[in-house]
Image (tube, rainbow, N blue to C red):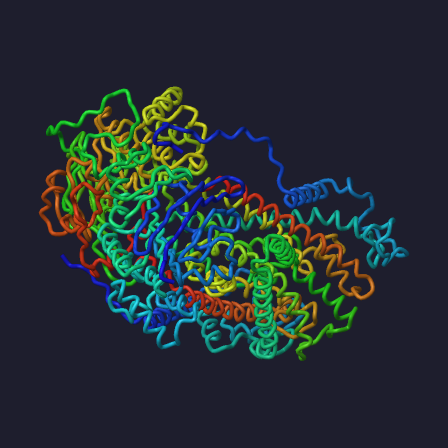
């Protein structure tokens, strides 16, 4: 702070930080996500057992040293299935979120940048899309276009798009009205430069958080659809499908449903915690 | 309790081991007023909060003695404090818009004090609420009591806030910056309310950074700096014959008391600052018959600017002064070419610069933008949050047409011109102080070697001493670079200090326009006279505060915030 | 030189009038949205591969006779131009004719009438339960120190991450099959409502509680809260009388979306718990490729959802009328 009688006194310059480790919760979450990614890319690192191998005499084994998470009704090892399911789930989650984001960014940018009339039209379109609860929208889509992994991804993506679009639009509008955009215009920057170099980067920044948490959400939605039998069909090792397959045996063999579900929960937790952590770090820099 | 004296001896406050108030002592006799004066970080607000036990959970408070009316205030339990707050000691914060619950009618807020301390029954309480509102000068009390703070004008809601503090006739009233967010005319009215409180026999403890405001009410003054008392004594003595250099510097920094051309801060600079000669120069920026309308969400059309003419000459400063709702900020945006007028035009160097219906396209304006720059009240909001100081300046140089290799050298020159050390380039604006940020904004503004700088309340958010330095810097730059300033402010003292000519605006119209000394010494229009009379002055200036009557007409303009309806096209 | 003086009217009447105006506008907008939804569905149907008549008449498994096909074609106006079909379609919708479900051989409206009540029951119960949990959690943990707040926050994050279908299965296993406290299926008794409602309510409660907690902490830092303390209010009174109303606002605003999420969740929960309801009907209809039923349920659900959102919006306005004051 400047001092009346002593001239300038600078606040001490912070020393260049070493890579600061995130707090415990966030570290665990990020580690889990890495492990998941690894499992998706190279499941062989985690298990050698074939997830689809049917071994009838080992059916309904509770968790043990031989089968860490037990076996299902056909003797398939659940741990192996969960690991291989990671690839399915991540693929669906990422792809669906990508679709959601693409639609959301297109609509959000249009609405935020396009001027009053375009904004109203986009707002209206969003309201129409919003009129359907997401799962109902997805079901509608599947009804019209059939089931399977492909439609599952598109359906999940469609279901999430309106929510993200609203967020993007809100962000774009907030940045558009920000002081530094006005200052850039007063300086004489051309519109294209302002939009590309300042508006978009600043508007998109907080969306990294939403994206991260969104992948977790997409995985849950996709699992829900698979659970209903409308996505990956049995005996695919997709977590939702596994849940549905084990549902009938819940009284006697709880591990069939418990562990796939647990992994869904952990993934969602991990993405949420990671997203929050990114948000806190970003906010430390934003005024 | 006949002897309602407040005794503070050796008050110490620390947060997590870091001391913020050291050895503060004073005595406030009943019916007197004491002011705690200081800039941000002086510890004045914290001290005030200690007197009601609200310094916060993390504060470590200790004192040799702390008592009011014979009651010991040291080590009171929370329960005991609750009995004191509101009943024996009333507290008024600044800016009623955020200091009153925005979702509740103001009447309920006042009622709450009465209910909490078990005053009377339902009927007497309701009557008391009305009585209190009348006492502080609110008209139509039954109606107003049912309105929420956002539905009242600034002055009325501040009165309501004060009423809630007075509800149980506390013997001591503490006011923390009670007039800071208010217009000059409204401020004068609120000061009158406080005079009346004092006249009724209550003791008053005022916390403020504004020495002139303090001079209107205080009998004694305590000057704080970084948590320590630097000077303390009767008001007349402290403010007219200060002994400590810090107090002297504070007084020297008040722009209203210092004629144009004089320095406000002790900062030394190479070039000796000479008062500008009054030569006739070319008209650079000219506004003719400007008008702007907005359709409010309630369906009413509001004429935010009407029939405004102004003319800015090279090397001179045109000050535009007005209260909230006067339209001066809108005029600034129209002058900048960021908002289009509905009527009239703006000419730059004789050529059309801004006309209604997009008659002058941005493509035509863009090449000329480097000659007109702007400085805002909130520099932080005008910087891209991702950029460092150097990047901000680099960006400005790029659009000014400076080639990339030449820019680093220019950045160093700019930082030097605004008296900032070169290392600051690596910092981010968030890490700088308010004064440093404004200097960076000024550096950005002069980067393109402009002829005109539009200054929109550039010093309103700064401490007095920092304000002085920035005003001096602006004056020096004007001399060095031959700049013309369009200076917008609500602060008459600042306007008087910086301007050559002044425009007074009210409700969107120009009510008076004159060279500065003429305006301030013999104002022609009744509103200008009212406005000038309402500005508090330091003792010894010879001016008495003239409190203007309540102006309800102003409410419509006060509540309508046209900045929310702006759509700066990009 | 005209000056606009504000006509100061009775604030309470003003507030009601503003609310009424807003309700009217929103309802009109809602009708427009529903019209757009119906239109979109109409065109989506036409985009489908295959002959729409076959879909209407029984899907891939039905084997309608050529005469039946011809009759349906005439009745549905499928031989007429698209515009006429559209008018027919809208006309039927307005009259409440949503077609006939061929998997159940009943008019769609009948199916909805029989099943809709149970879903409504479940959704409302879950929403109320979620809010009760939120308020309980906030009250119990309010201001008891950082440790308690941290634990509560953890609990909230955890419950928000629970997928409702998994939670349903787990609750079923533990409380229905394991402890036998509640029936594992059925839709008639109150007891059968408990487990499904909880499996929907817990994740939602976690989510809303997180938002509300953050909001509460922000609100407690506001100047008007400090003013309330200077009046001698206790900490609890400050939290309840002042802060809570502000803190609830984001939660209320989220409730609109929450209802949609609950409806989505109801689909799955009705399947898991074998409950009556349009959710389960929708699911079965999709499996049976019974298009009239799918479309019909979707449209009605959309209509209900739009209405629910309007109600939430009005509630928000009632609690916080400030948006009107933004520029006036």
Q: Is residue C237 shown above or below B32? A: below
- Name the one closer to the observer, B419 or A246: B419
Does residue A221 appear left or right of residue B40 in this picture? right
Does residue C106 appear left or right of residue C74 in this picture? right
Does residue A257 appear left or right of residue C261 in this picture? right
Number of marks in the rendered image: 0
Residue sitting farthest toward the right: A57
Task: Name the image quarter holding the C terminus of chain B.
Answer: top left
Question: Picture coordinates of residue C87 (x, y %)?
Answer: 44, 71
- Name the one closer to the observer, C89 or B547: B547
Question: Picture coordinates of residue C121 (x, y %)?
Answer: 59, 75
Visible residue check, residue C83: no
Does residue C155 appear left or right of residue C220 in this picture? right
Q: Which residue is drawn at 40% across and 71% down?
A: B119
Question: Picture coordinates of residue B503 (x, y %)?
Answer: 16, 43
Visible residue check, residue A30: yes
Question: Picture coordinates of residue B480 (x, y %)?
Answer: 24, 24
Q: Is residue B306 shown above or below A22? A: below
Q: Is residue A20 shown above or below C93? A: above
Task: Name the image quarter holding the N terminus of chain B.
Answer: bottom left
- Name the one closer to the observer, C211 or A225: C211
């Amino acid at each position: 702070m400047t001092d009346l009688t002593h001239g300038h006194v600078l606040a001490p310059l912070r020393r260049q930080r070493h890579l600061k480790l995130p707090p415990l919760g966030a570290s665990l979450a990020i580690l889990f996500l890495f492990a998941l990614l690894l499992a998706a890319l190279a499941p062989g690192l985690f298990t050698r057992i074939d997830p689809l191998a049917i071994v009838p005499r080992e059916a309904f084994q509770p968790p043990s040293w031989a089968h860490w998470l037990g076996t299902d009704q056909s003797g398939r090892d659940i741990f192996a299935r969960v690991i291989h399911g990671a690839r399915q789930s991540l693929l669906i989650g990422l792809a669906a979120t990508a679709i959601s984001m693409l639609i959301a960014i297109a609509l959000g940018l249009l609405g935020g940048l396009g001027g009053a009339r375009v904004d109203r039209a986009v707002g209206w379109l969003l309201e129409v899309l919003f009129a359907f609860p997401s799962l109902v929208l997805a079901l509608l889509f599947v009804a019209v276009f059939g089931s399977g992994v492909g439609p599952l991804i598109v359906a999940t993506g469609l279901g999430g798009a309106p929510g993200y679009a609203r967020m993007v639009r809100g962000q774009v509008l907030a940045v558009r009205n920000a002081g530094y955009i006005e200052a850039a215009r007063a300086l004489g920057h051309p519109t294209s430069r302002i939009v590309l170099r300042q508006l978009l980067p600043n508007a998109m920044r907080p969306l990294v958080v939403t994206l991260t948490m969104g992948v977790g959400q997409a995985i849950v939605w996709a699992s829900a659809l698979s659970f209903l039998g409308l996505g990956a069909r049995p005996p695919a090792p997709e977590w939702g499908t596994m849940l549905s397959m084990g549902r009938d045996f819940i009284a006697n063999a709880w591990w069939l449903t418990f562990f796939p579900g647990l992994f869904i929960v952990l993934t969602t937790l991990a993405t949420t915690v990671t997203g929050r952590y990114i948000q806190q770090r970003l906010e430390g820099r934003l005024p | 309790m006949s002897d309602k004296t407040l005794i503070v001896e050796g008050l110490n406050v620390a947060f997590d081991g870091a001391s913020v108030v050291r050895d503060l002592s004073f005595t406030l006799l009943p019916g007197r007023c004491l002011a705690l004066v200081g800039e941000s970080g002086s510890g004045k607000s914290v001290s005030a909060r200690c007197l009601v036990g609200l310094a916060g959970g993390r504060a470590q408070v200790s004192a040799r003695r702390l008592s009011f009316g014979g009651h010991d205030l040291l080590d009171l339990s929370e329960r005991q404090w609750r009995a004191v707050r509101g009943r024996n000691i009333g507290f008024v914060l600044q800016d009623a818009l955020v200091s009153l619950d925005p979702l509740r009618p103001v009447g309920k807020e006042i009622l709450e004090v009465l209910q909490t301390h078990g005053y009377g029954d339902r009927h007497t309480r309701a009557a008391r609420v009305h009585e209190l509102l009348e006492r502080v000068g609110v008209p139509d009390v039954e109606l107003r009591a049912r309105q929420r703070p956002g539905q009242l004008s600034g002055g009325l809601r501040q009165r309501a806030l004060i009423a809630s503090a007075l509800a149980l006739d506390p013997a001591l009233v503490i006011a923390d910056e009670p007039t800071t967010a208010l217009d000059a005319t409204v401020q004068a009215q609120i000061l009158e309310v406080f005079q009346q409180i004092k006249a009724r026999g209550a003791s008053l403890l005022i916390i403020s950074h504004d020495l002139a405001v303090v001079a209107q009410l205080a009998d004694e003054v305590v000057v704080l700096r970084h948590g320590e008392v630097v000077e303390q004594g009767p008001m007349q003595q402290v403010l007219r014959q200060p002994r400590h250099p810090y107090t002297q510097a504070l007084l020297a920094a008040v722009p209203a008391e210092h004629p144009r051309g004089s320095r406000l801060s002790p900062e030394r600079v190479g070039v000796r600052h000479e008062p500008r000669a009054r030569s006739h120069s070319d008209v650079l920026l000219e506004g003719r018959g400007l008008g702007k309308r907005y359709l409010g969400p309630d369906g009413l059309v509001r004429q935010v600017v009407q029939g405004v003419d102004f003319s800015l000459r090279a090397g001179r400063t045109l000050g535009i002064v007005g209260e909230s709702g006067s339209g001066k900020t809108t005029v600034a945006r129209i002058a900048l070419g960021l908002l289009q007028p509905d009527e009239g035009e703006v000419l730059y160097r004789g050529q059309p610069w801004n006309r209604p219906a997009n008659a002058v396209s941005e493509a035509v304006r863009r090449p000329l933008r480097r000659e007109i720059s702007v400085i805002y009240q909130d520099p932080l909001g005008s910087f891209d949050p991702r950029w460092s100081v150097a990047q901000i300046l680099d960006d400005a140089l790029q659009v000014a047409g400076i080639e990339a290799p030449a820019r680093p050298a220019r950045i160093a020159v700019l930082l030097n011109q605004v008296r900032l050390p070169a290392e600051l380039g690596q910092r981010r604006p968030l890490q700088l102080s308010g004064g440093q940020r404004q200097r960076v904004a000024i550096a950005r503004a002069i980067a393109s070697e402009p002829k005109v700088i539009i200054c929109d309340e550039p010093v309103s958010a700064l401490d007095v001493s920092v304000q002085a330095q920035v005003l001096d810097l602006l004056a020096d730059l004007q001399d060095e670079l031959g700049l013309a300033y369009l200076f917008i402010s609500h602060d008459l003292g600042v306007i008087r200090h910086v301007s050559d000519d002044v425009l007074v605006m009210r409700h969107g119209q120009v009510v008076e326009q004159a060279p500065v000394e003429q305006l301030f010494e013999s104002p022609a229009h009744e509103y200008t006279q009212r406005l000038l009379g309402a500005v508090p002055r330091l003792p010894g200036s010879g001016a008495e505060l003239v409190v203007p009557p309540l102006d309800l007409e102003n409410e419509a303009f006060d509540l309508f915030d046209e900045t929310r309806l702006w759509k700066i096209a990009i | 030189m005209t000056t606009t003086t504000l006509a100061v009217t009775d604030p309470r009447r003003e507030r009601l009038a503003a609310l009424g105006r807003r309700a009217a506008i929103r309802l009109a907008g809602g009708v427009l949205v529903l019209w757009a939804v119906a239109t979109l569905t109409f065109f989506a149907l036409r985009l489908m591969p295959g002959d729409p008549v076959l879909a209407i008449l029984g899907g891939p498994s039905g084997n309608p006779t050529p005469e039946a096909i011809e009759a349906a074609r005439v009745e549905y106006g499928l031989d007429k131009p698209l515009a006429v079909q559209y008018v027919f379609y809208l006309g039927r919708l307005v009259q409440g004719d949503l077609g006939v479900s061929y998997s159940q051989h009943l008019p769609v409206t009948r199916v909805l009438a029989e099943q809709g009540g149970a879903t409504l029951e479940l959704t409302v119960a879950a929403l109320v339960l979620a809010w009760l949990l939120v308020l309980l959690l906030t009250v119990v943990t309010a201001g008891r120190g950082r440790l308690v707040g941290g634990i509560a926050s953890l609990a909230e994050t955890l419950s928000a991450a629970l997928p409702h279908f998994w939670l349903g299965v787990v609750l079923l296993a533990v409380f229905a099959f394991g402890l036998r406290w509640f029936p594992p299926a059925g839709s008639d008794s109150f007891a059968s409502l408990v487990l499904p409602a909880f499996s929907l309510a817990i994740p939602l409660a976690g989510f809303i509680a997180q938002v509300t907690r953050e909001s509460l902490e922000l609100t407690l830092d506001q100047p008007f809260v400090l003013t309330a303390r200077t009046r001698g209010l206790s900490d609890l009174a400050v939290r309840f009388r002042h802060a809570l109303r502000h803190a609830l606002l984001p939660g209320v605003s989220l409730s609109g979306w929450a209802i949609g999420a609950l409806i989505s969740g109801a689909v799955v929960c009705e399947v898991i718990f074998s409950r009556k309801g349009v959710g389960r009907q929708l699911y079965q209809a999709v499996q049976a490729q019974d298009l009239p039923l799918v479309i019909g349920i979707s449209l009605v659900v959309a209509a209900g959802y739009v209405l629910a959102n309007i109600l939430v919006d009005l509630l928000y306005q009632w609690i916080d009328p400030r948006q009107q004051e933004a520029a006036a």
